Amino acid sequence: MKSTVKNVMTTRVVAVHRSTSFKEMAARLRQERVSAFPVVDDDGTVVGVVSETDLLPRETLDAGWAARVPEMTSRVLNEGDQEKAESLTAAELMTAPAVTAAPEDTVERAARLMYTHRVKRLPVTDAAGRLVGIISRADVLSVFGRPDAEIRREITENVILNELRTDPEPFTVAVENGIVTLEGTPETADLGRAVATRARHVEGVVAVRDRLQYPPP
């Protein structure tokens, strides 16, 4: 059974209101030892995310600094960074809309969202969009700590026996450090490919080495 976001997320979330000032957010980054905040409105609905990356332009692109940089460097500064440097509140600095996950999402889906959107964490929201937690890359990677014996048992009993309804006896399933090695001779090539494909989606599997001896067509 796949782990869901609610199984691994952190429920203590450091969030800021859309009216929170730059100065307060900079201080809280240091105090809370976080690198980003979900931004919420008055009823706790997530409206965006503000990160260190969003705050840095104001720190570096102040008037004194701009006067000292060469003209060529000034011309290549990103226009969006210039705007963020002049912003004062979370609502003005945040990236919106926020990429979020739901508590019922699988950890695998959360990982895909992080990869696709190139973010390090996802606010977790309920059906009304209110903040209920946060999931980080470290939380996602925690599923790879699953014991090898559990992975082997799921492939043998759940995948081969229950899902594919075939005898596990022709298959040898070995798991070491999350890496699955499949050996044996399946009854058909389609069956062998199905075992290998489904094994790749078992939680905790890092990779699958398909060493099955496929029968001729």
Image (cartoon, grey):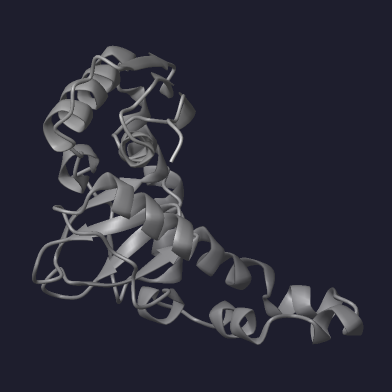
Image coords of residue 99 (percent x, y): 34, 67
Closer to the camera in the image, 105 or 61: 105
The residue shown at (39%, 16%) is: 175
Q: Quadrant of residue 182?
A: top left
Residue 165 placement, left or right of 152:
left
Does residue 30 appear left or right of residue 159 in this picture?
right
Residue nearest the viewer, comparing 117 with 175 = 175
Q: Residue furthest front?
A: 217
Check the picture and name the quadrant holding the C terminus. Answer: top left
Q: Tell whether 136 sits left or right of 118.
A: left
Q: Nearer the viewer, residue 19 or 117?
A: 117
Where 26 falls versus 84 (above or below)?
A: above
Q: Position of residue 82 (x, y in %)?
A: 63, 83
Q: Is residue 135 above or below residue 164?
A: below
For the N terminus, give its image quadrant.
Answer: top left
Residue located 21% across and 32% down the image: 159
The image quadrant that residue 114 belongs to is bottom left
Q: Quadrant of residue 113?
A: bottom left
| Residue 194, above or below 54 | above
The answer to whether residue 161 is left or right of residue 190 is: left
**Residue 40 % position (x, y):** 23, 70
- Count of marks placed on residues: 0
- Residue drawn at 21 percent across, 47 percent down: 5
Q: In the image shown, does 5 or 206 lie closer to the viewer?
A: 206
**Residue 65 x/y as whole percent:** 76, 73
